[in-house]
Image: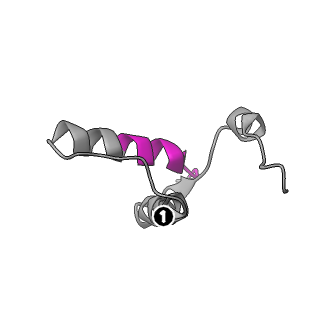
Amino acid sequence: MSEERQYYDPYQLIREVGFILSQNGLEVKDFPEGQLADALTGACQLLRAYGVMPGMDIRDTFDRRLPPYW
């Protein structure tokens, strides 16, 4: 039985968690500066714990714009 890797967009997981929290009556705010990196790290760790690789659709990856200082 060959095991094929599964991938999931960690940014999508962050959006979905925010939605679930708001649906459960919690006030969800935008991340303060620097907190998105913490959320992304946590989302990636959670996905890996489930055996899912964090990853994005290649088209989404190329659509993202790098900050001007890169």
Query: Relative to 12, is 44 above or below?
Result: below
Identity, as a three-letter code, of the amino acid under mark 1: Arg
Q: Position of residue 3 (x, y in %)?
A: 55, 54
Q: How is the image coloured?
A: one colour
Instruction: Classify residue 58 as left or right of residue 46.
Output: right
* Membership of 13 in magenta stretch: yes
* Residue sitting nearer the eye, 7 or 46: 46
Q: Position of residue 59 (x, y in %)?
A: 73, 32
Density class for disc 1 (Cα within 10 Å; few <14, some 14-19, many ≥20) is some
Residue stretch in magenta:
4-16
Secondary structure found at label 1: helix
Query: Relative to 31, is 65 above or below?
Result: above
Residue in the image at 42% along x and 41% along y: 15
Q: Which residue, as the protein is rendered here, is positioned at the far left?
A: 25
* Membership of 47 in magenta stretch: no
Residue in the image at 54% along x and 45% along y: 9
Report the number of numbered marks: 1
Residue in the image at 42% along x and 47% along y: 30
Name the residue tied to disc 1.
Answer: 48
Name the image quarter holding the C terminus. Answer: bottom right
Residue in the image at 52% along x and 46% along y: 11
Q: Position of residue 28 (x, y in %)?
A: 30, 46
Instruction: Classify residue 38 as left or right of residue 56.
Output: left
